[in-house]
Amino acid sequence: MRDDSRACNQYHRYISFIETLTMLEYTSRAFIGPSLLALALGGILGTAAAEDMGQSSTGLEAGVDAQVRPGDDFFGYANGSWLQATPVPPGKKSWSARDEINERVSQQMQALLDEVWTNPQGTVARKVADFRAAYLNDRAIAAQGLRPLKPLLNHIARVRDKAALTALLGQTLRADADPVNRGQYNSAHVLGLAAESSIRGEKNYTAILVQGGLSLPGREHYLSADAGMQALRARYRKAVSAVLAQLDPAHAASAAARADAVIALETALAQSHAADEVSDNERNANNLWTRADFARQAPGMDWPGFFKAAGLARQASFVAWQPSALTGLAVLVDTQPVQVWQDYLRVRAICAYAEVLPASFAALAPALRGAAAGEMPVQAVQRANAVTQSVMREYIGRLYVERYFPAAQKARLNTIVDNVVAAFGRRVEAAPWLSPASKTVALAKLKVLYFGMAYPEKWQDHEALVISPTNPVANLQHLADRHYRQTLDRLGKPIDSKQWVAAPQQAGGLLMFQQNAYNFTAALLQAPKFDAQMSDAMTYGAIGAIVGHEVSHFVDTLGAEYDSDGRLRRWWTPEDMSGYATASEALERQFSSYRPYPEVAVDGKKTTVENVADLGGLAAAFDAYRASLKDMGREVDYVRQQDRQFFIGYARSWRIKSTEEALRTQLTKDNHAPERYRVAAVRNLDAWYEAFDVRPGDRLYLDPENRLRIW
């Protein structure tokens, strides 16, 4: 990968999900103003013709604005009724198709969680209900006190030497990291484990160790001299002292001094941690350590004892995602007193489960996770819902799909995906700027690409899942233990490209170059992007074009860094890059000509990669849709009607309204062009002109020789 791999990594992890809440941490675009209504597309575009198109507004075209010429403003034409009827909600700066979907998903999830308790004992639904009920069972939590944590607290108390300490650290290792796919490179424990695809073309899952062990959100919270950070640390110190005093009332007088020692230990851990910009780089997977390397590069800790206690005695090598953290941990195990480590582990145990412990500990939870003073507390029901959706997300995903996404639609969409991928492959073969050798690699990648739609091909077995309606601590521990055992079981086994990382009930998509795979979730497959009643033509336009866009990334300048086996290898040649730059230059100029405001233009250069993907994906989806018509493709009137639905489906999938502030921010920060201009990609396809009678003089009209094709 290039030196700017971190930016690529951040940008194309594509976690657009409504989540990021773990057991330890809680972790809203077309401005409808005169400038955009005029489309102010720049000097290359002509003036609008004023005549009414006279098109029918029945059936699937009921929402168009017949007063707008498609060739002047296709976005406004296709989305006319919605734009006129939909305000930007109070408190929002924009309202888009994605926002509509997210709001609907939130309502769907609330309805689902409100009803799971009606299911019989032993069912997945009832286990989800019991987990949530336990989280809200204040009476049981108060009655149990610290009993659910006693085994762990007693284990900590029995630690008398560094060997026992190391063994305990190994026994509490958990698989709460995913640095490759989800950008989770900090663990709640001193180290975290992941079993993932790596970057050297491995056929089997690789063991990855990541840094961890901090209570506050990140290393800067310990090291920054910022006044706000200092205030957070002071608040955290008081909370740590209060925890130690409650755990050991007989020695409450020494709690403040012990808290200082704990925070000093955490600060030293933080100093050894890699910064986020260093951690967020897939080249960290090149830090492959053998067992012997741990002794050489991280001396001071009994690593064989640690791995044995962690169930990793037979693991020969690991990726050290942040080597400095391993070295720093070993130094601290070697040099810090056992008693300080014991207090640290006690505080970490309370911090992990504070919200489901008695009120005196639960009250400390915000300060223990670094919340600022005065921060609005999360209501108990909201917190329970969020935690349930996070830690039981795969089980909830199954329930969500069973209720909201029929299996027949997955099969239908899989056919569309297959057709779009095949069509994109034909475009790769025909690309004049891509060398024959590179075409071979690109086609090989497309051949083995897994593009998962809606939900996983298989679900986890839930029979052995034990959930108590009264013991939330035990539930959290059981789920963490279960996930850890599953992670250990994957190590050394062949990589399954069909293993889902995204949660079906979280609206979004996840691109995974190392697995040569993509997850497109069921939650995102809702109106206006998808509807079971939509025609195939409209579905190809709305969903097929998105599929084509994402497929393009596997073989474009981003995917050119990864071979078909996920190996990090630049397979584009310098000549390919030069040819791509020449081929995409006209598209860059096309987008740079769009001016939402007289003094502001779209940055065609910054948005080039996504604009190329939009155009290539739209074209491949159109090819696939046309091929799907088969014999009906000879019926001229029918084809024109279907073509119109294809393009309207595309435009409606990107509908949005936003304030001027939001649009200006988007123009400055987003690597995607504003949605109105993304929709304008249709002006590069000949069929769009025929379908909507677009003529010279229309603002979006391009002479045939100026209509672009990259793929």
Image (spheres, rainbow, N blue to C red):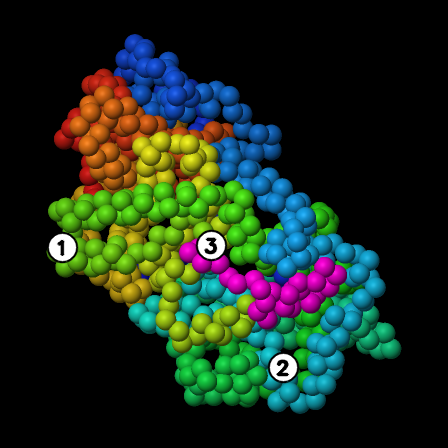
* The quadrant where residue 442 appears: bottom left
Q: How many marks?
A: 3
The residue indicated by pointer 3 is 502
For badge 2, the amino acid type reads: Leu
Q: Position of residue 66 (x, y in %)?
A: 37, 15
For badge 1, the amino acid type reads: Ser
Name the residue at 42% across, 56% down.
457
Name the residue at 68% across, 75% down.
345
* The quadrant where residue 31 appears: top left
Name the residue at 52% across, 47% down.
402
Q: Secondary structure at mark 1?
A: loop
Question: Counting other residues with Cα less than 10 Å from the Cα at mark 2, is it few (<14), some (14-19), or many (20 or more)?
Answer: many
Q: Is residue 129 magenta?
A: no
Asked if residue 79 can be seen in this view, the reply is yes
Q: Position of residue 651 (x, y in %)?
A: 36, 30
Number of the label disc, if any, that sits on residue 557? none
**Which residues are drawn in magenta?**
456-482
Number of the label disc, if any, that sits on residue 168? 2
Is 186 situated left or right of 39 in this image? Answer: right
Q: In this picture, is 96 found above or below 360? A: above
The residue indicated by pointer 1 is 435
Asked if residue 678 can be seen in this view, the reply is no
Q: Quadrant of the N terminus?
A: bottom left
Is 33 situated left or right of 673 in this image? Answer: right
Single out the residue that lies furthest toward the top: 51
For discs 3 and 2, the disc positioned in front in the rendered view: 3
Could you tell which of marks 2 and 1 lies nearer the N-terminus? 2
* The quadrant where residue 641 appears: top left
Is 321 situated left or right of 213 in this image? Answer: left
